[in-house]
Amino acid sequence: MRRSIIYPKQKFIKQVAKISASETTLKRGFSKAHSDKDFDGYKEKLVKLIPAEIVGAYLTLKSILDTSPDIDSVTIIQWVIFAGLLVITPIIYNRIYGVKEFKQLMVTTFAFIIWAFTIGSPLDLFFTDLSGELSPLKGIIASVLLVFYSLITPLLLTPPNNK
């Protein structure tokens, strides 16, 4: 499955390339090519903007670290895992899933940051008090941020401006 979001205009351009160049054929082709099934709606965008594989990899590696017996440099390893997956997210989406639009790559990468923040990440350091205890506000802020980001982002992602 391609993870690139398909917009109405992109689908039309692909169809026009297959149709002869006569004006009447183009008009007929547009009306046929421009149906609801030809481009991604809200649900399809929502699914394509969640970096499920990256979040799954992060969750697996985090679980391994959480169950490991006292490792001295857990925080450093957490940062390396977080940074590594952060860097690799747009690369995987571009090269493996064929996502070419910069905006979608950045939205998906930022989604990984929010998912990692919600699951628990080295970013938790910013929500600990002097005794090292995690603030209960972190969980609330992370959950609210994840819900709103996930629900609103597909609405705001608009077709690229092709001139």
Image (cartoon, rainbow, N blue to C red):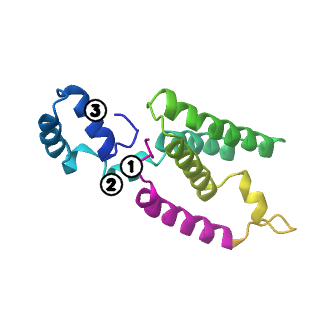
Amino acid type indicated by mark 3: Lys
| Mark 3–mark 2 CB contact (< 8 Å) | no
Pinpoint residue 22: horizontal percent, then vertical percent. 16, 31
Residue 149 vertical placement versus 60 (above, below): below
| Mark 1–mark 2 CB contact (< 8 Å) | yes
Which residue is the site of mark 2? 43
Question: Most extreme residue toward the front, as rendered?
Answer: 23
Which residue is the site of mark 3? 14
Q: Mark 2 Cα within 10 Å, few/some/many (few <14, many 20+)?
A: few
Q: Magenta span covers which residues?
A: 137-163
**Going 53% across and 31% down the picture, which residue do you hit?**
92
Amino acid type indicated by mark 2: Lys
Which residue is the site of mark 1? 47
Amino acid type indicated by mark 1: Val
The local secondary structure at tag 1 comes to helix
The local secondary structure at tag 3 comes to helix
Task: Say if the magenta span includes residue 152.
Answer: yes
Whether residue 113 is visible, yes or no, is yes
